[in-house]
Amino acid sequence: MRHPILFSACIAGAMVLSACEKKSGDAAVKRAFQDVNVVDESNLNDVMLTVADPNEAVAYFQRASANDPSRIDLQRGLASSLVRAKRTTEAATAYGKVVKMDGATADDQVDYADALIRSGDWAQAEKVLDGVPPTHETFKRYRLEAMVADSNQEWKKADSFYEIAVGLTTQPAGVMNNWGYSKLTRGDYTGAERLFGEAIRQDQTLFTAKNNMILARGAQRDYTLPVIPMDQVERAQLLHTLALSAIKQGDVETGKGLLRDAIETHPQHFEAAVRSLQALENNVSNG
């Protein structure tokens, strides 16, 4: 009589074991899919932060952070995307939220200061940078420190910060250009010209530095083009800048000659230079 009971017990035990195995298997499958989802989400986040349309990235991170507001990586993604979308006031607000969250870093503070500068809040940016630990020595931190010092006309501090920033990057052309522009605004035209030249040597495609170099030369009444890499369109544009510099300093005839050179040099119709020359000639005829 015990055999049926034993058989039933065995069946029940097998069913329990099967259920346990099923639960264990389901849990393993669930974990595997969670791992896949994490990888997929991480890849998608990276795409959104780098190559996606900035406003699409903003919308993505707004949805994601609303679903899980405690995740600092999603809040960072939202703030960074707002910067890319040039929505600077919103970006500053978003980074202000990030720096108050658990897991916030010194990099977050620097990014917050960057967003504040972009939105024009220099005073608050300076306060945020003052709170960054001195041991946090990064290119971005010192580039921003230099810009804030510039805005306060603290030239020695600015020079020191620019010099440190240049030493912390393998691509210093942009910061050299900024440093040169700082020198230009102070009236140190030879120092500015030297820095613009160094920026161009680092990056021959940096037209801003080329144009700034022309401004520095023009301020010294040197109306010749420097020996730097330039294509025909750039040459015409630089001649135009040089002409305007000459006219601004009262060297009108020199400026008119440079405008004519710019018009002749440009491979297409150079409307801006033509208008400038016509305005000058009309003023002369009216006088």
Image (tube, rainbow, N blue to C red):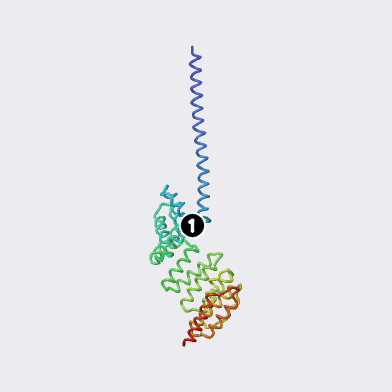
Residue 42 in the figure: left or right of residue 228: left
Query: Residue shown at 50%/39% (left/top)?
Result: 31
Q: Quadrant of residue 152?
A: bottom left
Q: Is mark 1 on a helix, strand or loop?
A: helix
Is residue 221 or residue 59 the one in the foreground? Answer: 59
Is residue 183 or residue 252 the one in the foreground? Answer: 252
Q: How many labels does the image show?
A: 1
Q: Which residue lies furthest to the bottom in this view?
A: 287
Q: Is residue 151 above or below residue 31?
A: below
Pointer 1 residue: 54
Query: Residue shown at 48%/22% (left/top)?
Result: 12
Q: Position of residue 88 (x, y in %)?
A: 43, 61
Q: Position of residue 205 (x, y in %)?
A: 58, 69
Q: In which quarter of the image is residue 209?
A: bottom right
Is residue 129 or residue 177 the one in the foreground? Answer: 177
Query: Residue shown at 41%/59% (left/top)?
Result: 90
Residue 240 in the figure: left or right of residue 120: right
Q: Residues within 10 Å of mark 1 (few under 14, many from 20)?
A: many
Query: Residue shown at 53%/68% (left/top)?
Result: 174
Is residue 175 or residue 33 the one in the foreground? Answer: 33
Q: Where is residue 131 in the image (x, y as percent from the top left)?
A: 40, 62
Q: Residue furthest top?
A: 1
Q: Where is residue 136 in the image (x, y as percent from the top left)?
A: 47, 61
Q: Is residue 267 above or below residue 169?
A: below
Disc 1 residue type (three-letter): Pro
